[in-house]
Each structure stands twice: as structure tokens, then as C-alpha cells.
Amino acid sequence: MLTTIEHDLSQLFGQAFADNDLSFDFGATVRCTRPELGDFQCNGAMAAAKQGAGNPFVAAEKVVASLADNDIIKNIEVVRPGFINIFVNEEYLANKLTTFSKDNTFGSAEDLSNTKVMIDFGGPNVAKSMHVGHLRTAIIGDSLQRIFRFKGYEVVSDAHLGDWGTQMGMLIEGLKKRQPDLPYFDENFEGEYPKESPVTIQDLETIYPEESGLCKTDEEAAEKARQATLELQNGRPGYRALWKHFVEVSIATLKRDYGELGVTFDLWKGESDADPFIPLVLKELEEKNISVKDQGALIVPITDDEGEKVMPPLILRKSDGAVMYGTTDIATLYERIHEDKADIVLYVVDGRQQQHFKQVFATADLMGMDKVCTYEHTYFGTVNGKDGKPFKTRSGGVMKLHDLIQMAKEEARKKLAESNFGVDFDEAEKEEIAHKVAISTLKFADLRNFRIKDYIFDLEKFSEFEGKTGPYLLMQVARIKSILRKAKEIGAEPGELLETSDNERALTFKLLEFNSALNKTVEKRAPHFLCEHLYNLAQEFSSFYQKQHILKEADTAKRASLLKLSSICLNQLEVGLELLGIETLERM
Ligand code: ARG
């Protein structure tokens, strides 16, 4: 991994402190908040003084006097009460940037291929359309899978379909009422799968809400649905065959929506895949005296160290014998650990499921799974409307993901038409631009906030070409591409990086901050750090370009160097946006 300037300087200063019998850690160096005073600053002398090192100014001077010979520092100054301000060498900076830009990971990748990270995200439910809640898990989960892979981990992502709960029994009973003659309902069904599906996604989407509504008021219907679910779980052949159709028909539609978002999964597994592991888990829980019987149900009490109950128990099996969401989650974790050999499992799931994951993880801890695996609920907040309540359609219904994407496209078309972008492009290119702008709008607006925060959905604001938005970043990328194209037309190509002059300094430093932004993103599983970096980088490029007329530069070596700097910046923006799942445009 390529070291940052902060790191190089901290080492150098750490040694100087140590040579003065002070702690190495005082050498920590950070970017200077006031660029006119220095590029970096070390405040260790003040901290050392607090711990009895005497006058900070004197200590700082001593440290500076004992600095080892180096090629990093150009100028250094000690100012009262004991700040050390540092300007770095132009040549060192150019060299650093040259090495840094040699590979597409900017020296940030490590060999982490023996750490397997499984990311559980998406979690759409069979027969139900994805709604706005599924937007966040898709966007954040996808970005995290890209980032972890880029960093060097082995990553496996799983869509983890909700395909094993009572909604399955509702669908079976609902269909039975409508088409009682289907062979699947025959107790002696032996038919083969695959066969043509007896239902379309539209059928499922009509049956499900009707049945689920009915079950809320009609106890007999609810009982039938529970019974059918249980029989399905117990392996009744006709129900299993039918269920496979439900799942396949649903996956086809889900793939359309994920396709529009550009989100893919390695595995299209579901809650049902944990089924073979349920008996194993239940046996272990019983043998280890973790599970207890409670009024006919099987549960795991969740207690603190003193044995006090801290939240409701995890229900493993209801009194009718059906297994629950928590049971499949424990069994899935068991499978991920024992079969897939996962080292880390991240659950990118709504924060409103925090209690569920606490129960599941507490149970897993009791089973000792925490000894071999790290599991985390990488949760996210709610997308709210302007009224501060969860985002709904105008009529107050659930906002479907598909419709939301169409709305974003509509807004992008409108904004593009209002601006003078792409006026002379043909229809196909305009459509491609609208699509990519729309996806960048949704993704960036979501990822730019720390994931655990709620945010207010304001499509108009998110679609602006100004400010911290996806479209702004796409525009900056297209702009640099256009500069490079124009340069080519006059025969100018990126060349060797020369010593940086003042105009390029801030941009160079910003580029070199990529690694720390990426590392923070990985550490906190939070892409907003990367978003912030890319936005600042784009802005830094803007101010660089304002000061420095690249194409008018008469000195050709200098011009080639400036073009090189621009192309590194372009590359970093594109790589970074790709990590957010955002596709860029050649022109707009
Ligand atoms: N299907 C669930 C839902 O829509 C989300 C599943 C999340 N993943 C998990 N392993 N529990 O609420």
C-alpha cells in the first residue's frame, strides 16, 4: 500500500520526538488548516508540553533541529506556542503523484484475498414489488461490495430473497381459490418441475395484497395460510413446485429493477436455502441449553451478563411448528460460516430491523459463532418525504422502486432540456444521458449521507447540476474529458509530471487523499467518506482549471504535465464513481 504524505511526515517527526526522549506518537502530522502557513502541521510539541515536556516552543525547535535528512520538507517554521508548519518539496510531491497514479487503485489495494466478506443486501420479497426501502439496501450494498473488492477482499454478495415466510402460504391459498383445479394442490402431486408457470408476476402482485388483507381480519383464512406455509416448509411436493414458480417469476422482475440500477449479485439465494441447516442449528441450540420451550413455542431468551432479559426473545419455532425469520437468519449465518467459510458478514438492512439482528447475533454469540466470524448489521436510516414521514406516493401508497426510477429519469430529462447540455445529440444518446444522470442522482443523493441517517427525498434538489449531486460530478467528468479531447485535437497529450507549481498544489494534495478516504469508507462501511472526497476533488479541479489555462499554456512540457494532472484527476473521479456504482458519460 502506498503511504500518504501524512504518514511519511508522521514517521519522520515521530522519530525526531523519540530522539528527544518524547513519545513517537507526538509526531502525528495533519493537513494545515491555513494553506498560507503551511501544507502540513505537527502539533505534538503542545501535547508533549501538557505531559511535562516543558516549554512547547523550545521542544518544537529541538524536534525540528533533530529531524533526519529527508527529501520531503522544503520549508519548516516553528510558531508560538509550539506549532510546526511544514511546506513540502515540489519534486517529492511530483514523484509521489507519479507512483500513486501508476495503477488504477492509486496504491490503495492490499492482498486481503484470504478474508472472505459476505454482503447480505437487497432482501426483496417474493411476489412483492420492491419499494423505496429496497433502494437504500441496493445502493449502499452494491457500493460496499465494489469497495471491498477494490480494496482486495474476497467478496460474495447475496440478494437473500424473502421466500420462506407466511406470505408463501397466503399465495398458495390465494391461488387455490382462483384456480382450484391446478395439479399442484393434489396431495399426491408428483409432477415434474420445470413446467410452465401457472402465474405471472401480475397475478402474484394481485393475490398477495388481497390475501394478506383478508388474513388480517379472517382468522380462518390466516390459519389456512399458516398451515400451507408449514406444509411447504415440510416439503409437500405440489407446494414446493408451485413455490419454485413463484420465486422464478419474481426473480425475473427483480432482475429488471436491479438491472436498471446497475446492481448485481453473486448469489440469488433466499431464506429458504437455509432450510437444510435449520435442524442442525436447532439441535445445537438444544444441546447447548440455549433454546427453551415456552408455551409450546421454542425460543431463545436474550439476556445480559447478569441474566436479566434485555429484549423480547428470539422465536425459533411457533407453537404450530413453523419456523420464523430469525430461525432462517441463524441457519443462514451457520451456512455462511460452515459452508461458505465467511470471515465477515455484513447485513445491509434497514435500521428498523435492529432488534431482529440483535436477537439473531446474541443467539449466534451464544453458539460461539463470534469466535470464527464477525457479523454486523450495517444498517441505514429511512428515506422520508418532505413531511418527515417515510416517503410515499402522492396518494399515500407505497412508492415502488420502479416508479421512483422513472420519476428520476423524467426529472433528468426535464433538467437536461432546461440546460443547454446535449442539444445536438440524437435521441438515443439523449436517452442514455437521461438514464445515467437519473441513476447518478438517486445513488449520490443516497450515498452522500452517512448511512445511518434518515434523509428527505427531494428529487428536484438531488437532480441539480450544481452542488453536492451526482449530476454535478458527471458534468465535471465530462468536462475534463472534453478538455483532454480538445488537447488531442491540437496535438497535446498528457506527459511527464513536472514539479508542481502553486496552482496545482491543492489539487495534488486532494488527489493524494484518496487512500485515506477509501480506508475510512472500508473501516466504517460508509461510502459517504468517498462521496465527500470525490465532491471536493471535483471542486478542486474546477478552481485549478480557473487559475490555470491548460490549453493556452505555451511551454509544451508544462502543458503535458498539466494534462497529466488532469487525466489523473479524471481517472480518480471515474474510479471513485464506479465504486459508488455510478456510470460516467463521455459528454453531456
Ligand atoms: N426480506 C427482508 C425484508 O424485506 C430483508 C432481509 C434482510 N436480510 C436478512 N438476512 N435478514 O424486510
Image: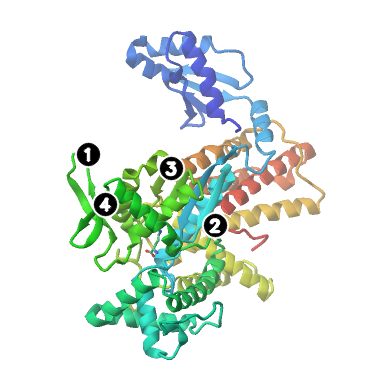
Q: Which numbered tag is attached to residue 305?
A: 1
Q: Secondary structure at mark 3?
A: loop
Q: Which numbered tag is attached to residue 291?
A: 4
* Residue at position x 66%, y 52% in the image: 480
What's the CA distance linking mark 1 and mark 3?
21 Å
First in residue order: circle 2 vs circle 3: 3
Quick check: marks 4 and 3 in contact, CB under 8 Å? no
Q: Amino acid at mark 1?
A: Asp
Quick check: marks 1 and 4 in contact, CB under 8 Å? no
Q: Nearer the viewer, mark 2 or mark 1?
A: 1
Q: Amino acid at mark 2?
A: Tyr
Q: How is the image coloured?
A: rainbow
Q: Position of residue 449 (x, y in %)?
A: 42, 52
As rendered, which of 242 and 66 lies closer to the eye?
A: 242
Q: Position of residue 439 (x, y in %)?
A: 53, 64
Circle 3 residue = 373
User: From the image, which quarter does the N terminus lie in?
Assistant: top right
Q: Note whether 464 is above or below 497 in the view shown.
A: below
What's the CA distance linking mark 2 and mark 1?
51 Å
First in residue order: circle 2 vs circle 4: 4
What's the CA distance linking mark 1 and mark 4?
17 Å
Circle 2 residue = 472
Q: Which numbered tag is attached to residue 155?
A: none
Q: Nearer the viewer, mark 4 or mark 3?
A: 4
Name which quarter of the figure residue 425 lies in.
Answer: bottom right
